[in-house]
Amino acid sequence: MEDMVWKTLWKIKAPPKVLHLMWKALTNCLPTRTQLYSKHIHVKLSCPFYHIEEETIVHVLLHCQFSKSCWNRFGLASVSAHSSNFFLRFKDLVDKNTPKLMEEAVMLCWSIWQAKNGVIWNQKSCSTADVMFTVRLTLAQWKHAHSRKFEPLLVPSGTYDSGERWTKPTTHMLKINVDGAIFKGANAKYIFFEHVLLVLHCYCWRP
């Protein structure tokens, strides 16, 4: 049974960070409040969404009223309500849903966890519609990026422009190869020159 669950998990087409979160949940390593408390970290045990029940892995990802609303909105097959073991719940999901729906299921767990962190660290409320949008947008963007094949550019020998070839600097000369990107609102040119001057200073200084 365990082998089947693990094989299914690693075959799901979802971002690695999502599968990593699921691995943590399945191995009971997800840092929920009850898990942190068991490691002698004194935190509130109540779920940050409604502050009624303790935040366990099963509760925050499946049982919390907010989580239930998210699962219902996606129309995914519900899981057994009799086990508090997330591993068994995940197996139940695997048995009841297609591989495509499992992609959304793991994305939903990840998005609920992100929403929970938003409440704790940023006091940011989140609706089920927000979660649904995040799940489908993130998954679609990842699939689009993952489907693109970046093949190496093969240029026939002798077709390079001589001006674009890298050449070794002459004696007593220093050549600095740089690359970079400019982001909106970033004062990139000053950061760039500051680092170049630092390199020159280190190169020229002699103890």
Image (cartoon, rainbow, N blue to C red):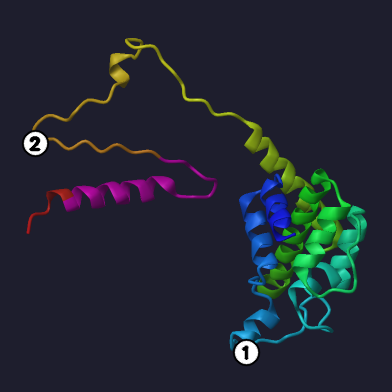
In the rendered image, residue 141, in percent from the top left (x then y), is placed at: 69, 41
Verify whether residue 188 appears in magenta.
Answer: yes
In this rendering, the label closer to the viewer, 1 or 2: 1
In the rendered image, residue 144, in percent from the top left (x then y), is placed at: 68, 36
Mark 1: few/some/many CA within 10 Å (<14, 14-19, 20+): few
- The amino acid beneath tag 2 is His
Q: Name the residue rendered at 88%, 63% in the picture.
A: 79
Horizontal placement of 81 versus 137: left or right?
A: right
Picture quarter with the N terminus: bottom right
Residue position marked by numbered label 1 in the rendering: 42
Picture quarter with the C terminus: bottom left
Q: Which residues are magenta?
A: 180-202
Among numbered discs 1 and 2, the one appearing first in the sequence: 1
Magenta-highlighted stretch: main secondary structure?
helix
In the rendered image, residue 31, in percent from the top left (x then y), is placed at: 64, 74
Give above or below for 60 relative to 110: below
Q: Name the residue rendered at 69%, 39% in the picture.
A: 143
Q: Quadrant of residue 180?
A: top left
Residue position marked by numbered label 2 in the rendering: 172
Q: Quadrant of residue 100?
A: top right
- The amino acid beneath tag 1 is His
